[in-house]
Image (cartoon, grey):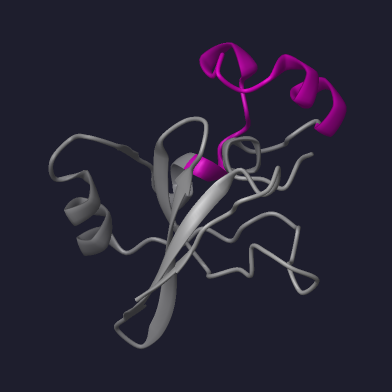
Amino acid sequence: MEFRVADGVTPNFHQGVIGYRERPVAVVLGRDTGVVAVAVPRDVTGPGQDAGPLTFVDFPELTEALAGDGKFTVMTAAELARPFVAAEWPAVSAYDVRYWKPESLGEALFNYWD
């Protein structure tokens, strides 16, 4: 397992990269929302960081394990692909929503906005 901690302004999430089945996956944790999801791993620091939208993936057994104790809100790829509705997520900055215009919930909750 490898932890990739975002220590600057961006991205707004941390990730733990784990070997899972046939490929590594990242368990991402939103710094502002406490929402957890499973995604394709990303470089979150330094000059090689990829700042585009995350690619969320479904691993039901892993998602179930993450949601097990109820401390986090764990979201699936389908939930994160839904259109973003700002009124449902007041913790997401209204200014950022107007400026960045996120199309999906995943883009609004896990991003590289400055």
Q: For this view, does 85 lie left or right of residue 25?
A: right
**Total labels drawn:** 0
Q: Position of residue 98 (x, y in %)?
A: 82, 21
Q: For this view, does 7 lie left or right of residue 16?
A: right
The residue lying at 41 percent from left, 35 percent from top is: 34
Residue 92 covered by magenta stretch? yes
- Is 105 situated above or below 85? below
Q: Position of residue 65 (x, y in %)?
A: 18, 55
Q: For this view, does 39 lie left or right of residue 105?
A: left
The residue lying at 51 percent from left, 42 percent from top is: 80
Residue 58 covered by magenta stretch? no
- Is 109 situated above or below 89? below
Extreme right residue here?
99
Along the viewing direction, whichever of 1 and 90 lies nearer the viewer: 1
The residue lying at 63 percent from left, 18 percent from top is: 86
Extreme front residue here?
7
Question: What are the residue bounds of the magenta stretch?
Answer: 80-100
Q: Position of residue 43 (x, y in %)?
A: 64, 70
Q: Position of residue 27 (x, y in %)?
A: 40, 59
In which quadrant is the C terminus drawn? top right
Extreme left residue here?
69
Along the viewing direction, whichever of 34 and 47 lies nearer the viewer: 47
In which quadrant is the N terminus drawn? bottom left
Q: For this view, does 3 lie left or right of residue 60?
A: right
Extreme bottom residue here?
22
- Is 3 situated above or below 6? below
The residue lying at 76 percent from left, 41 percent from top is: 113
